[in-house]
Amino acid sequence: MASLDPVLDKDGVRLTVDGATATVTLTNPAKRNAQSPALWRALTQAGRSLPGSVRVVVLRAEGQSFSAGLDRQAFTPEGFDGEPSFIDLARGSDADLDATIAEYQEAFTWWRRSDIVSIAAVQGHAIGAGFQLALACDLRVVADDVQFAMRETSLGLVPDLTGTHPLVGLVGYARALEICATGRFVLAEEAERTGLANLAVPGEQLDAAVGDLAAALLAAPRDAVIETKALLRGAQERSYEEQRSAERASQARRLRDLAGVGE
């Protein structure tokens, strides 16, 4: 990746921008990029800091693991410095607990914004919150050593960082249930075969493969990509006839724009 002055560099998250491409890097390889509320706030800030010129966002991680998931310190009575422990959160009101989880989720929601396409470059372990962060992106390119696992259920919890919706959409209900309820590893071959990964490559080719994909995405006109993404994102919620109507309306906008005719 190019060496660029960071727009943001804090709490294990670095954001750099190179023209129409932004790169968000997890920067705590010593802890296998384990996640914390501070990291989630930094990810949320990264999304808010994107210049309007950015069309593609690459999410990557330093070290051998993409993210080993939630830092286990969260489960200790003391939690993180300056943060309420999970035990403290559980003792709070329903409204406070809901608001806190909603705040955590914000780090995982902006990756599917209509004006960008996000690509997760995933190597090594992507466990729990790490798996859900990869699922937050539109596309995933994985190294051949990738190990996805959803371990929340094994800990008596549920995946709550927005990962359940994309997981079911990608692999179907039955396989998603089996992956979550067993907590087993999903390796590169299965990830590519089942649609979790768009592409699996040798580890040394990961950055190059992501760069090629980003370049291909940037080759198409921005407004056409935005309209196409919106059509595809909404397809599952629309009936066949509603999707036909949405296609007509979208194409009318594109034709008028190309012809220079105002609506």
Image (cartoon, helix red, strand yellow):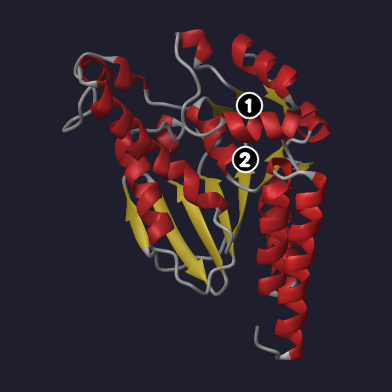
Residue at mark 1:
148
Name which residue lies at 79% across and 35% down. Answer: 192
Kind of residue at disc 2: Val
**The C terminus lies in which quarter of the figure?**
bottom right
* Residue ID for mark 2: 122
Position of residue 61 measured from the top left corner of the image (x, y, whole percent)? 52, 44
* Figure disc tally: 2
Label 1 amino acid? Phe
Q: Taking 47 as reference, is 126 above or below it?
A: above
* Residue under the point 62% across and 46% down: 121
Q: Identify which residue, 127 or 247, lies in the foreground.
A: 247
Image point (52%, 38%), residue name: 133
- Mark 2 packing: few (<14 Cα in 10 Å), some, or many (20+)? many
Q: CA distance from mark 1 to mark 2?
A: 9 Å
> Residue at coordinates 67% horizontally, 49% vertically from top-left?
233
Element type at mark 1: strand
Q: Which quadrant of the view contains residue 217? A: bottom right
Residue 71, placed above or below residue 245: above
Position in image of residue 45 (x %, y %): 35, 54
Is residue 253 shown to the viewer in this render? Answer: yes
Q: Is residue 28 left or right of residue 241?
A: left
Q: Which of these two is toward me, 184 or 138?
A: 138
Q: Estimate the x, y position of residue 135 in percent, counting from the top left.
A: 60, 38
**Contact? badges 1 and 2 (CB < 8 Å):** yes
Q: Can you tell which mark lies on residue 51?
A: none
